[in-house]
Amino acid sequence: APTLNDLVVLNEGDGTSPGSVSIVTIPLCSVTALPSNPNCDPTNPVDAVTFGNVIATVPVGINPIMVSVLQDGTRAYVANSGVAGLPCATVAVPGVSTTCTVSVVNLTTDTVTATIPINGHPAYIAATTGSPTGKVYVVCRDSQVMTVIETDTDTVDTTIPLQGYGVSVRVTKP
């Protein structure tokens, strides 16, 4: 999240319990900021003294596999693949089905603000600009559609049929 000087890192759970997102501060200093900024370390003028501190750990879904941050730095979207080998369902039945979701993490409050069900076990996620007009794209290795999430409502906008199972999705700068 470059606008926040933060790094968003996924932490896997144990495969059946939720994972988490660690938000790590990575502020950098410059030669001109060094004399006037008390957070700059004179022995290492590149890294601020708070560089590398974990500022929050936010629980997300089962088996988080990938994270993508909106370009405006407001939110992170986490693809939670659920329990491997179990079919996806809206409500999980232990040993029978699992939830396959995207967790929306507000990077200002460090909280999950929405959990969006996905049709399939998410494998890859990509996010565009930000709110209110951004989109998040999710593909699954066991689904022949790409799910599109609107960032203004954090709900599924549409699904786009694919020629095969989704493996990867990327976006380019507008």
Image (cartoon, rainbow, N blue to C red):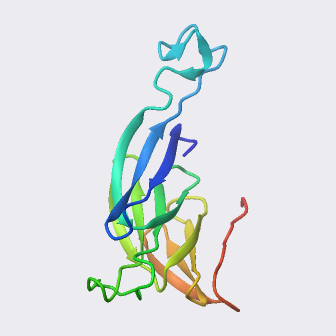
The residue at 40%/66% (across/down) is 103
User: Where does the C terminus fall, quadrant-wise?
Assistant: bottom right
Percent position of residue 10, x then y: 47, 54
Q: Is residue 90 above or below residue 6?
A: below
The residue at 52%/49% (across/down) is 73
Task: Depth check: give the residue in front, 125 or 92.
Answer: 92
Side (left or right) of 45 relative to 79 = right
Percent position of residue 19, x then y: 37, 60
| Badge count | 0
Percent position of residue 143, x then y: 56, 88
Side (left or right) of 22 relative to 37 = left
Q: Is residue 29 above or below residue 111?
A: above
| Residue 120 visible to an observer of this rendering | yes
The residue at 46%/55% (across/down) is 75
Side (left or right) of 151 relative to 35 = left
Q: Quadrant of residue 29?
A: top right
